[in-house]
Image (cartoon, grey):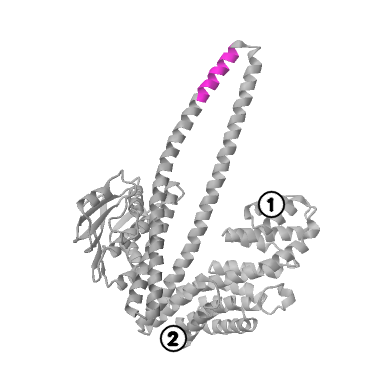
Amino acid sequence: MKYSFKLLLLFSFLANFLFVFSQNIENTTIFEEEIKNRSSQFMDEPNFKKAQLFFLEKNWDSTLVYTMRQLSLPNQNQEIKNYCHLFRGFSLKEKKIFNQSQKELSKISKEFIFYYKVRIKLGEITLEQKEFKQAIHYFKEIEELNDNQLLGIKKSFVKHNLGLCYLHLEEFDKAEFYLLESVKLQEEQKDTLDLIGSYGDIATLYYEQYKDDLAIPYFEKAYDLSKKINNHQLKQNTALNMAVVEENRKNFPKALVYRKEFEQWKDSLNDQNKVWEVAQLEKQFAVKEKQKEVSLLQAENKIKIAERNGLFYSAIVLLLLLGTAIYFYREKIKTNKIILAQKESLDELNATKDKLFSIVSHDLRSSVNAMKTSNAKLLENLETKNLEELDALLHQNSAIANGTYNLLDNLLHWALLQTKQSYFEIVSMRLYFIVEQMAYNYQPLMLEKKIQFENTVSKKDIIFADQESLKIILRNFLDNAIKFSKENGIIKIYSENNDENYCDLIIEDNGLGMSENTRENLLKETTLLSKKENEKTIGTGLGMQLCKSMIQKNNGKLDIKSKLGKGTKIIVSLSKKEPNG
């Protein structure tokens, strides 16, 4: 029971932070208009004018540069100083440099029109730094102010944050008072987003005190209210809270419904994030291409100028002309070699890209067509109310969606790896806990196929690897083990130490297995991508290639043992020593 409380508390706090963020967004337009109007009298100062413009555009680095230039000028007006420290404090907070942000905001005089906005910002910073008593001091300063003095800051926002501080300090009576006061104001103002976060906080408050009967109705209120908004993060958090509530009640069928809803919103949110990441990659690629064009033009201009100067001085000194001609000839040869090497590399990358796109597009088309066909059957069975067939089709759709999602996720990581944009840091870690974390994420899928799972990795095993890439490796191999296992199958993950330099992590299943030819092809270094043998599964071999690349980057080794119809063993050998050890 205590484990469930902590889990609920974690997701409730996620909702809290989202709640604070959403309130700030709501007040941003009012605050920016006030800044624009009240600081217009100082627009004859060039540095201040640029600082204000960049601040409103949320270009924090440029804001810091021009405010520093303005402050370095002698005999500064105190009001201008206040605005500069305000701009700097807000910019540093957005860049997560909290200590410097506090120093800048503390320099603002009490007579400044936005003084109470500054105190709110200081309260938010200390709350993020978990300095709860100091945060209470800042929020108490503005608790009793009227609406005119608050300049658009909601009283419910102040009371809510006071409640959060007391909740963290475990002063539950005070926390309850302020959180209920905040909810009362939000209900009057009909702030739906704010109310969801507040209901979650009050539920957490009661759960911390083991008052389940008081907590659960607020979790239910938050869940019901989340149905009325278009915020996937809040929908995801409230659905997971309800799943844990029902698990505590031993109502497992209902808990499973909530968990499936949680996974649905989680996948939807991940899809949005992936689209955004792909867009960012495309933007970065376009910028780099432009930079290359500019650099090439600059190089060509330099060559033309040098050639013109050489011709000019050739009339004076013949020897200088000869030396200059030889120099530029050598430079041209060198440039041509570089261009030729770049062309060969680009041709190789284009061939890889074409093959990748061909296979991935084929699989995407196949999965979409499968989904389309399945949906048509689903509609037919809805009319006949054939529940057994409906259940089978829904599970089929879920498998298609999961496979397509994993394909796109692998594609993104492959692109990041190939363009050398992925962050990579080898550190020491206990292997057992990484395996346990990844296995937890796949529990719903294993439960659905009634697969028995065993994690017997030794808790003493310490390896050196990049944590994020190791998670990707485990996720792909565990996903394949589930995919190719039959119902009531067994998946085991365990470790062996047969070498003083390597720890062997073994993922074993008793599923379909593979032929010796397939096993050898998968281990070949020259194999880029290969089509799947089982046409009922979504996959390009990209996941295996991605795992092989990441294992190699982690200074590890891969081996596969398998027999057709008798299961598969994936053996990942991970280094026990530091890279330079």
Residue 441 in view in this figure: no
The verdict on residue 531 being magenta is no
Density class for disc 1 (Cα within 10 Å; few <14, some 14-19, many ≥20) is: some
User: Residue at horizontal 45%, vertical 39%?
Assistant: 346
Question: Does the magenta stretch mainly form a helix, a strand or a loop?
Answer: helix
Query: Is residue 455 or residue 501 the one in the foreground?
Result: 455
The verdict on residue 325 being magenta is yes
Residue 174 image point, x, y percent: 56, 83
Q: Quadrant of residue 107?
A: bottom right
Query: Is residue 146 or residue 213 the one in the foreground?
Result: 213
Assess whether mark 2 and mark 1 are in contact (beta carbons under 8 angstroms).
no
- Residue that carries the numbered disc 2 in the rendered image: 212
Q: Which structural element holds mark 2?
A: helix
Placement of 90 over or under 321, stated as above or below = below
Residue 28 in view in this figure: yes
Residue 356 image point, x, y percent: 40, 49
Query: Is residue 169 or residue 323 the one in the foreground?
Result: 323
Q: Earlier in the sequence, mark 1 or mark 2?
A: 1
In front: label 1 or label 2: 2
Tell me which segment is drawn in magenta: 319-332
Residue 482 image point, x, y percent: 29, 65
- Amino acid carrying mark 1 in the image: Met
Which numbered circle lies on residue 68? 1
Q: Which image quadrant: the N terminus?
A: bottom left
User: Residue at horizontal 51%, vertical 83%?
Assistant: 221
Residue 370 image point, x, y percent: 37, 64
Q: In which quarter of the image is residue 41?
A: bottom right
Placement of 213 over or under 368, stated as above or below = below
- Amino acid carrying mark 2 in the image: Asp
Q: Which structural element holds mark 1?
A: helix
